[in-house]
């Protein structure tokens, strides 16, 4: 009897479709329509948002390739994303190892480590702009007192430092999120494995190489993928810290597209850049999943 | 020898725990004490690590001279509205994806994950003309509609841990007793999966409460601005009023802190269960 009912509920597709219908429609309107529309717009010549345009084929894409600002923002997106992923995963790993230790208050720490992540970006940007201020900021003060530097560093106001400073601030915001994910993988490693390894005389690094790393590898693969896609997409943090400046020194793709679209109102050009970025992430994601997940499996 | 080795290990251990704690907490501590220092002390070099005198003047100034309260209420409205809708949409969808069997289920789930790739600024390029056509620009509804669309897909994923852990036997028993499936959903399933719903609620609340990109374009007039956009104006002024902006920062943090204190551990369960499969 129960089995019969069970099969009935599981195999009635209408109920299942009915339940996903609302979210499906919502996603279609707010995500898939905009994507298709942007692709369409990128083949038109809408020079000012709100105007009608004509079909111009790949003209906007050709123009992008000849735009040195676009090429620059492409390079900066690669640097921003690559360094962010490296720092975030690196720091997250160490943080997760620390959180995996036995210490007083570990339950509390394992939850509240996410503090930088739950604080709104506008507040984070405020905090760091205040702390990194050349004349009033505590960071410059500490560096000067400890005689590390002789004159104050305009961390966010100089083309030399703005990129790396923004990367470090963004790392501070995101590493806890990934640390929590890696920690979960560390926690399910059976302790017997380490005990057996110790009896066999394995060194700390051998244990790490042969037990820890293989166990957390699947999570690391996921983390690196999510981390790179999210880092490439960061807009709020960069915009509120530097507005892409000084000059164009922190202008990544999202900033470039935002400026083209909503400050110059060149819709078609912005759409072409956005579609380029989408395709780039899509190809990256596909290649990554295909190669890396195959290797680890 | 052995006990010396042990205690040095534990010193290293506590040193690294405290270092991690300091990295996390000190910037937040700094903005908090800054908001309480009187202006001369706030702007003095060297700065005082522990304030010599405390004042609420910045809070008073912020609430009296700026539209902070309006921004605050707008943000709460948008965040509550979005998270309520996200909870409804994702619990229905989550039940469907994890509990029903039908064609295209896997495809639908993959589609939800593919949304990681969508650049948000690309969505904004097309949503802005769309909302303009529907006269929804400069209307908080446009933000709610957008935030639900962006946050819902990933939250289906977060529900996974909770929805797969509710025993199916309970549903089967209720079915045998003649309960309808809608009844089962609301009387048995959702109450048992409540922690998952809490995790989803906090996640979409945090995102909608803090979102800047869409809010900076879709909202024009001051009376509809949300906190991130309202506060960003203060940051973009030539002479930044650090006292008031520090006070505002502290006030902005409070709702996320309260929400996270209640359901933070469920949220962590949600994101980690997604990572380890």
Image: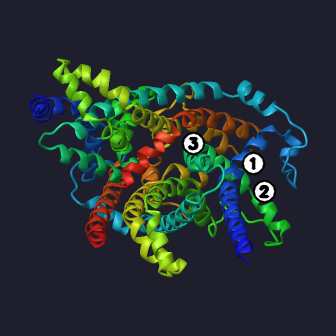
Q: Secondary structure at mark 2?
A: helix
Residue A293 figure quarter = bottom left
Measured in 3D between alpha carbons, the distance from the residue under mark 3 to the one under mark 1, in whole angstroms, is 16 Å
- Quadrant in the picture for residue A169: bottom right
Residue A281 shows in the view: yes
Q: Earlier in the sequence, mark 3 or mark 2?
A: 3
- Rendered residue at 73%/27% (across/down): B65
Q: Label for residue A138?
A: 2
Cα separation, mark 3 vs mark 2, equals 22 Å
Q: Nearer the viewer, residue B220 or B202?
A: B202
Give the residue number, with chain letter if any, for mark 3. Answer: A120
Query: Label 1 belongs to which residue?
Result: B30
Where residue A157 sits in the image (x, y, percent)? 67, 61
* Circle nearer the viewer, 1 or 2: 1
Please state the horizontal and vertical placement of residue B23, each as a whole percent of the image.
67, 57
Q: Contact, CB < 8 Å: mark 1 with mark 2?
A: yes
Question: What is the tally of numbered marks visible in this picture?
Answer: 3
Category of crowding for the residue at label 2, using alpha-carbon neighbours closer than 10 angstroms: few (below 14), some (14–19), many (at least 20)? many
Residue A242, placed above or below residue B94: below
The percent coordinates of residue B8 (x first, y second) are 72, 71
């Amino acid at each position: 009897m129960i089995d019969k009912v069970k099969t009935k509920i599981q195999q009635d597709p209408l109920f299942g479709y009915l339940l996903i219908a609302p979210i499906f429609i919502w996603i279609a309107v707010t995500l898939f329509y905009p994507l298709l529309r942007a692709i369409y717009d990128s083949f038109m010549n809408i020079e000012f948002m709100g105007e009608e345009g004509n079909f111009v084929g790949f003209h906007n894409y050709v123009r992008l390739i000849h735009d040195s600002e676009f090429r620059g923002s492409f390079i900066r997106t690669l640097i921003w994303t690559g360094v962010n992923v490296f720092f975030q995963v690196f720091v997250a790993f160490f943080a997760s190892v620390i959180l995996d230790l036995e210490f007083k208050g570990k339950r509390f720490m394992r939850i509240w480590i996410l503090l930088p992540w739950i604080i709104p970006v506008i507040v984070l940007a405020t905090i760091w702009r205040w702390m990194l201020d050349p004349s009033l900021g505590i960071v410059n003060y500490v560096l000067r007192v400890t005689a590390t530097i002789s004159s104050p560093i305009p961390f966010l106001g100089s083309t030399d430092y703005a990129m790396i400073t923004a990367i470090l601030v963004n790392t501070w915001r995101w590493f806890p999120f990934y640390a929590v994910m890696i920690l979960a993988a560390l926690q399910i490693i059976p302790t017997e494995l380490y005990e057996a390894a110790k009896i066999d005389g394995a060194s700390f690094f051998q244990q790490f190489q042969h037990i820890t790393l293989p166990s957390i590898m699947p999570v690391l693969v996921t983390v690196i993928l999510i981390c790179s896609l999210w880092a490439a997409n960061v807009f709020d943090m960069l915009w509120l810290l530097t507005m892409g400046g000084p000059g164009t020194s922190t202008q990544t793709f999202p900033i470039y597209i935002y400026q083209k679209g909503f400050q110059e109102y060149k819709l078609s050009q912005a759409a072409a850049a956005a579609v380029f970025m989408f395709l780039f992430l899509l190809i990256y994601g596909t290649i990554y999943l295909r190669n890396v997940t195959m290797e680890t499996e | 020898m052995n006990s010396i080795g042990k205690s040095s290990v534990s010193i290293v251990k506590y040193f690294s725990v405290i270092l991690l704690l300091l990295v996390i907490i000190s910037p937040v501590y700094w903005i908090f004490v800054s908001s309480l220092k009187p202006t001369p002390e706030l702007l003095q070099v060297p700065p005082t690590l522990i304030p010599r005198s405390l004042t609420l003047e910045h809070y008073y100034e912020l609430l009296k001279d700026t539209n902070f309260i309006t921004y605050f209420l707008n943000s709460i409205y948008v965040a509550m509205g979005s998270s309520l809708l996200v909870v409804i949409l994702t619990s229905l969808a989550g039940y469907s994806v994890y509990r029903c069997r039908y064609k295209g289920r896997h495809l639908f789930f993959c589609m939800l994950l593919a949304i990681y790739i969508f650049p948000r600024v690309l969505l904004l390029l097309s949503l802005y003309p769309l909302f303009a056509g529907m006269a929804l620009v400069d209307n908080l509804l446009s933000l709610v509609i957008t935030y639900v669309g962006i946050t819902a897909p990933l939250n289906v994923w977060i529900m996974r841990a909770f929805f797969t852990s509710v025993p199916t036997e309970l549903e089967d028993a209720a079915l045998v007793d003649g309960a309808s499936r809608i009844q089962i959903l609301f009387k048995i399933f959702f109450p048992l999966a409540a922690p998952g719903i809490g995790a989803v609620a906090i996640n979409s609340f945090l995102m909608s409460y803090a979102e800047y990109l869409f809010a900076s374009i879709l909202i024009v007039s001051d009376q509809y601005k949300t906190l991130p956009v309202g506060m960003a104006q203060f940051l973009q002024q030539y002479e930044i009023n650090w006292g008031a902006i520090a006070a505002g920062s502290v006030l902005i943090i409070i709702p996320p802190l309260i929400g996270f204190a209640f359901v933070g551990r469920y949220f962590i369960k949600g994101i980690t269960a997604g990572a380890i499969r």
